[in-house]
Every structure is written in structure tokens, then in C-alpha cells.
Amino acid sequence: MNILEFAKEIFDIEINELNNVKNKLDESFEKVINLILNSKGKVVVTGIGKSGIIGKKIAATLASTGTLAVFMNAAEGIHGDLGMIDKNDIVLAISNSGNSDEVISIIPSIKKIGAKLIAFTGNKKSILAKEADYIIDIGVEKEACPINLAPTSSTTATLVMGDALATTLIKLRNFKPEHFAIYHPGGALGKRLLLKVSDVMHKLDDLAIVEKHAPIDKVILEMTNKNLGAVCVVENNFMIGIITEGDIRRALKNKESFFNYVANDIMTKNFTYVSENDMAIYALELMENRKSQISVLPVLNDNTLIGLVRIHDLLKVSN
């Protein structure tokens, strides 16, 4: 047996089945999307076994991207967890066969409560499909398991259908990184998405600042004393230019004239800047996504200098 070739066959089988399920998408999917968008309640995802495990992931993805969602194990639903369902809710029941005992057992109660029922099933003739208000077909012809028994292609198809559901809702809700960050405040991801420029910038008192007629030796002295890698040039309280260590190095090529320079001679006048309310990750992208990368950004408020942010500070919170 060629292990690598066999593994690749598994990929091929599941990819093929995903394409088949993709081609089954129809107006039912659109109706389910609109149902969730217009709902005043939550989405309760339920299932049992492997379907239940996939259901947990779908519920978690929905919840973390702006859709109020919870997971209810179908077996626990029989023993009291149905109390979490309200008439305004939508129940998304997952069962490949559509005839799982635990899932079928809770359908009458869901109907009495008045919640809408969506079926993720591979059997459109099943009890679940017949009782559901909406059916999403996740049926596969072949499991990737060599004996065609262990849920493989079917669970993958269910997972991807759940992702399609969640990400379509993300798009329609205009869900943004800062919204995502609210639900992910912990760890590096939360730091990257929650922090604003104002949280990481160096304040005015820490900055090297000169006027446009300041001699080059004063510029260098200010840059050395403040040690932020840049000098901000201001006039009448407005920032008119910035001098970085790179500007100093370029000016040094003209050794004969170097010590006759003033700030105005070597400063960058058309500089890139940010505001204090911009997201820190946006400032980092401004620095990196350009032909020639920069390491500092002035922070302005109506052209008035209020701070400076360095790439070193941003990288600390993005890792």
C-alpha cells in the first residue's frame, strides 16, 4: 500500500463530494440566510455524535461573527435543554440520515414552542426533512472511509455548508475586523484587532520636534535625544514634514553641503500619517503595504501633531 497515494485519494474523494454538494445549493439557502438575518431570536444548532461535533463548530463560528447562536446536544434536549429554545428562535438540526432518534425526538417540542426548523440533511425523504421548514441538502454519495461507513465526506460537507452560511451572513452584515475583535478579546488576535493607534502611540512630550529653519545639527541632536527614529517639523502648530534616519543618511551623500542644511531642506513634505482613532493594525498595514516600507507614522488631529507610532510598537502587539 502506498500511504501517500491513499491519503491523496481521500482528499480527492472529499473534494469531489464538496463540489457535488456545492452544485446542490439553491434558493433554500437564500431563504435560510434571509430568515436568520431577519430573526429576532437566536440560532440553536443541534445534532448528535459526529454531526453534533460539527454543529458545535458551526454554532461557535456564527456566535463569533455576529449571529446570536448556541449549541444544544440533541440528547440533552430530550432531558430539559429544550428550555433554551424560544418561539422567536431558529433551530438548525443536523443529521445526515435525517432519522437520528435523538434529533427526531425533539421535533414535536420544537414545533409546539413555535421555533422555525432548518434541516441540514443528506436525506430529503427523512422524517427531519419532512418536518423542517427549510431543507439544506448536504448529501454525499461516498464517504472517504474505505468501508464507506465512518462519517468523513459527510461531516466535511456539513462543516463547509456551515462555513458558507456564516460567511454569507458576515458579508451581508458588513461585519468588520473591529466587530470580530469584540468577540475575540484574548490573545494576540484580540490585541491586533482591538487596539487603536492611541493605545500604542508616543505622546507629544516624547517626540523630537523642530521648526523648518532648524539647523541640521539640532535635528540630529533632537533625534538622538528622543530616540524614536524621526523628527517632526512643525510650523504654527501644524505638521509640515518629517525627517527620518533614512533622510539623514541620504543627506550625508552631499558631505560638502550637509552641515549647511536646515530641516526644510531634507524633510519629507508629502508624508503618510494616521489619526489616533485608526486601528493599530491599519497603521501597520500602511507601513508595510507599500513599495518602500516606513518605520514611523505621525499621528495627526486636523493637521496638528499629537503623537508618533513606530513599527516596533505595532509588531509587539501583533505577535
Image (cartoon, helix red, strand yellow):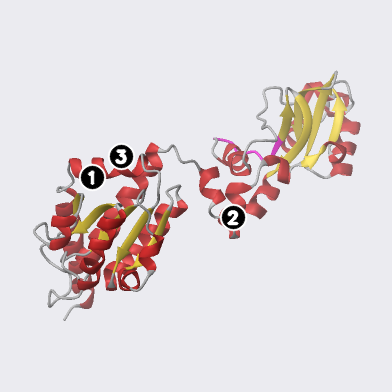
Q: x%, y% of residue 59?
A: 38, 58
| Residue nearer the viewer, 167 or 35 | 35
Residue matched to label 1: 29
| Residue nearer the viewer, 51 or 270 | 51
Q: Amino acid at mark 3?
A: Asn
Residue matched to label 3: 34
Relative to 260, residue 189 above or below: below
Q: Nearer the viewer, mark 2 or mark 3?
A: 3
* Measured Cα–Cα span from mark 2 to mark 3: 29 Å
Q: Which residues are magenta?
A: 291-297
Q: Quadrant of residue 61?
A: bottom left
Residue matched to label 2: 185
Q: Amino acid at mark 2?
A: Pro
Q: Quadrant of residue 304?
A: top right
For residue 299, side relative to residue 102 (left or right) = right
Q: Residues at badges 2 and 3 in contact (C-beta under 8 Å)?
A: no
Q: x%, y% of residue 319?
A: 60, 57
Q: Which mark is residue 135?
A: none
Q: x%, y% of residue 125?
A: 8, 59
Res 156 visible: no
Q: Amino acid at mark 1?
A: Phe
